[in-house]
Amino acid sequence: MKDNRLLEVKNLKYSADGKEIIKGVNLDVKEGEIHVILGPNGAGKSTLANLIAGAVGYEEPTEGEIIFDGKLLNGKPIYERAKLGLTIAFQEPARFEGITVEEYLKLSARNNPDANIEECLRKVGLEPCEYLHRYVDESLSGGERKRIELASIMCMKPKLAVLDEIDSGIDFVSIDEIGNLFKTMRDEGTTLLVITHRENIANIADRASLMCDGRIVETGNPKEIIKKFEKECLTCTVQNPEVLKEINLNK
């Protein structure tokens, strides 16, 4: 039987400034799925995303292994991981002074001869005639830059896209719009690992993992993971100091 695990994370640990942030994460992402990591703010989700992608400063975990498409990623910089077919959309989308949206998307599509940059823009809800000649800088809102970043990933067509809090501030009309976009990306050949703290995003997933306090607590059916998140994480005073603050105010 074929092993369809595209990404494997084995006993991953990561420390910074003397503090352990990732505490032995085990995770697998199957080829062709939308896999959501759900957890409260401060759970270590973005740190895990950066470690998987090899973002600057996160190339080497303290302990454990990251295996992508059968290859060990430990120590590889972000550009080498990109060559293997792994990319990330960061929580805060990048700005590129002096580069137009058209130039940016053409760069993303350079290894994908079938890419249609205008169609990719339309799929993320932007009209090419309004955006192709604009610059990818502060003149665009954060939501517009996130949509353009998603369009660039569609042009690139990587094997795996890690989307870190991609729904945050993106001004999507509805959860259905986000879901349809994710499913389009999956159906066009990109496996998705989506990082979020919103339960409704997890409903889009084929599988979901619950992350709390630097660990993957459970992986399984998204509906069951959401129930566990609502029952155990949203009321947790360790992961949600606002809950503790509210309790103290009501004493």
Image (tube, rainbow, N blue to C red):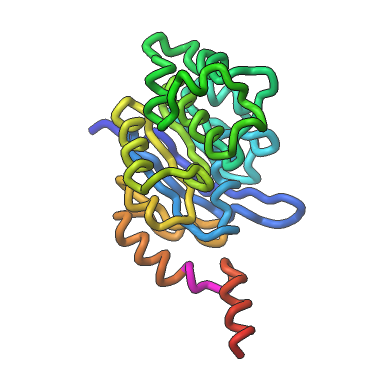
Q: Quadrant of residue 119?
A: top left
Span of residues in magenta = 233-237
Viewer-nearest residue: 175 or 28: 175
| Residue 204 showing in the rendered view | yes
Viewer-nearest residue: 182 or 46: 182
Q: Main secondary structure of the magenta part?
A: loop
Residue 124, position as x, y percentages in the image: 41, 31
Q: Residue at x 53, y 39 (%)?
A: 143
> Looking at the figure, which quarter contains the N terminus?
top left
> Looking at the figure, which quarter contains the C terminus?
bottom right
Viewer-nearest residue: 106 or 10: 106
Q: Is residue 6 above or below residue 236?
A: above
Q: Residue at x 52, y 43 (%)?
A: 164
Residue 68, position as x, y percentages in the image: 46, 31
Residue extending farthest front = 130
Q: Residue at x 64, y 31 (%)?
A: 139
